[in-house]
Structures are given as C-alpha cells and as structure tokens.
Image: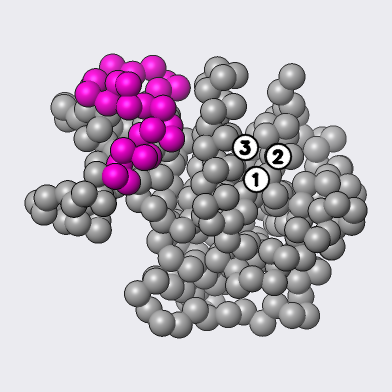
C-alpha cells in the first residue's frame, strides 16, 4: 500500500492545492439542499474550501476507525460531527489536527488548527492561573521568552472576555469547576486565532446556561470567518450547525442538517443507535 499523503498548507506558503470538485460536489455533500437553505449553501460552495478530506482511512490499532471519508468545508461555517460511539468522530478530529496518522487518503487544511479535546489533563504541579493558560496560546507566534506585544494582550483579553472568564483570570486553573475550566480551554483555542477550530464534545457535563453560552461563542467565531467543527452526541445542538457530517466509520452524509436528517441511511442509523439525545 502506498503511504498516505497529508498536506497541511500554511498561510506562509503561496499555494493552496485545490481539489477538482466541480463534478463531485453533489456526491460529496449528500445532495443539494432545498428551500431557504439553498441560497446560503450555494454561496458557501462558491468559495475555496478551507478543509478537504479525500478518501481518508484512519486505523486505531487493528480497528479501522475511518474508511474512505471525503468531504469539503467552507470558511465561516459550523459543522457538527455526529455518529454513535466508536463511529470515528474523535478520529476525524485527530486526523484533521495531525494527532493521528492517515492510513490512506489526503487531508488538506488552509492554515493552522486549534483544538479543544474532550479531556485535557493539566499537570497539578504546574501553578498556572487562568490567564497563564490562555497566554500559552500566543507562545507559538511569539516564542516562549519574548515579551507579549500589545496586540497579543488584546487578543488574550478578547478571548477571555468572549468566554466570560476574566472575572477569575487570576485563579488557579486547578480550582475551577468543570464548566469554568472548559470555557478557559475554549478561550485558549480562540486566542490562537487559527482559521480552523475543532471541539470534541465541548458541552458535555456543562449546565444548560454554560451550554448556550458556548454555542454562542462557536457561532460568533464562525461569523468571523473561522471554520468550526464540533463533535457532539446532542442532535439539538447538531441541528444548529450549517453542515452535519454523519459518521459510521464511513461518511454517510455531509450536508445541511435538514438534508442530512432526511437521508435514509442517516435515518436508519439514528433509529438503531441509542446514544443520541435531544435537549429539552
């Protein structure tokens, strides 16, 4: 088997390797939507994709986690990733961020990727304040020992304000509740200012108010042009996205939610998978 290619194209490079999508968009996106979604969807398809998966396989040990996954996503959109446990949601995010190697296929990303994992361990011996954790996001662009510029401080301030964590910015990260800690990690991801943002089950364990606040942050980030992908088990949350990727190892569908949920294969999957829920 030939080795898999994973092309991550950074803004510093002049070229963006465009896939030939003209003849395959309908198949890749599960069909064109109808009704009020059509104009918005067509406008988004007219721009260059920021994320492209082309025939991607990923193995986790001996298990095939993703098989032949193909889709393309536009800037400024929120995409929910749904599927039963073990369907490949976290594997898809890992393949996109570069944490997981590809067995075959190609992933193309137009820029850097920021990621909020479902479980992030912070060494309890590290004495980090909330502001310290968010500041870490600026180190890749500034270097560990170079002083923060006014622009960096402004970015950190805005990220903390967006996630409503400035009020406890001097508290230890280890003193926070699960919901507060999650918001801090999202603020850190926002402070990276990456054009692609990945979140793995970000609302799990949060109270209803914190869930709504986080979903508003996600939408605001997309409105600023970021491509956002969110893995979730909550169909009510997934339906608020612009696109829905439905996984069962294969990519069953990538389309606007109303189109995806009308797909017979998706309907059959949801009828047999007990792990999906709708919030009240």
Q: Quadrant of the C terminus?
A: top right
> Would you place residue 151 above or below residue 200 in this image?
below
Q: Report x, y in % for residue 23.
A: 78, 80
Locate residue 15 relative to residue 12 in the image: left or right. Answer: right
> Would you place residue 153 above or below residue 44 in this image?
above
Element at label 2: loop
Residue corresponding to mark 3: 232
Report the span colored magenta.
154-180
- Mark 1 / mark 2, whichever is N-terminal: 1
Q: Dot 2: few (<14), some (14–19), or many (≥20) neighbours within 10 Å?
A: some
**CB under 8 Å between callouts 1 and 2?**
yes
Between marks 2 and 3 in the image, the one whose residue lies nearer the viewer: 2
Mark drawn on residue 240:
2
Locate residue 245 relative to residue 150 in the image: left or right. Answer: right
Q: Is residue 163 magenta?
A: yes
Q: Quadrant of residue 85?
A: top right
Is residue 163 or residue 271 the one in the foreground? 163
Q: Dot 1: few (<14), some (14–19), or many (≥20) neighbours within 10 Å?
A: many
Q: Report x, y in % for residue 50.
A: 55, 66
CA–CA distance in space, label 2 to label 3: 12 Å
CA–CA distance in space, label 1 to label 2: 8 Å
Locate residue 232 relative to residue 138 in the image: left or right. Answer: right
Q: Report x, y in % for residue 256.
A: 77, 52
Element at label 3: loop
The answer to whether residue 100 is seen in the rendering is no
Mark drawn on residue 80:
1
Q: Quadrant of residue 97?
A: bottom left
**CB under 8 Å between callouts 3 and 1?**
yes
- Residue drawn 74% across the image and 39% down it: 239
């Amino acid at each position: 088997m030939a080795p898999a290619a994973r092309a991550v194209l950074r803004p510093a490079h002049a070229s963006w390797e465009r896939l030939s999508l003209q003849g395959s968009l309908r198949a890749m996106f599960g069909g064109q939507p109808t009704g009020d979604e059509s104009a918005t969807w067509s406008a988004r398809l007219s721009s260059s994709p920021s994320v492209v998966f082309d025939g991607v396989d990923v193995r986790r040990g001996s298990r095939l986690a993703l098989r032949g996954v193909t889709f393309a996503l536009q800037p400024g959109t929120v995409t929910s990733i749904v599927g039963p446990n073990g369907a490949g949601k976290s594997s898809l995010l890992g393949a996109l961020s570069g944490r997981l190697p590809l067995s075959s296929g190609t992933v193309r990303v137009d820029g850097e990727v920021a990621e909020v994992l479902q479980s992030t361990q912070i060494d309890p011996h590290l004495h980090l304040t909330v502001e310290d954790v968010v500041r870490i996001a600026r180190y890749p662009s500034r270097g560990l020992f170079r002083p923060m510029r006014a622009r960096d401080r402004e970015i950190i301030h805005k990220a903390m304000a967006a996630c409503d964590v400035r009020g406890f910015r001097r508290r230890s990260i280890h003193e926070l509740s699960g919901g507060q800690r999650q918001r801090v990690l999202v603020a850190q991801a926002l402070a990276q200012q990456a054009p692609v943002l990945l979140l793995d089950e970000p609302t799990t364990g949060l109270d209803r108010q914190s869930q709504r606040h986080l979903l508003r942050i996600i939408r605001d980030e997309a409105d600023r042009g970021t491509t956002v992908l969110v893995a979730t088990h909550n169909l009510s949350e997934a339906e608020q996205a612009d696109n829905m990727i439905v996984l069962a190892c294969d990519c069953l569908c990538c389309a606007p939610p109303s189109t995806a949920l009308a797909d017979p294969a998706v309907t059959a999957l949801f009828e047999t998978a007990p792990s999906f829920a709708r919030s009240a």
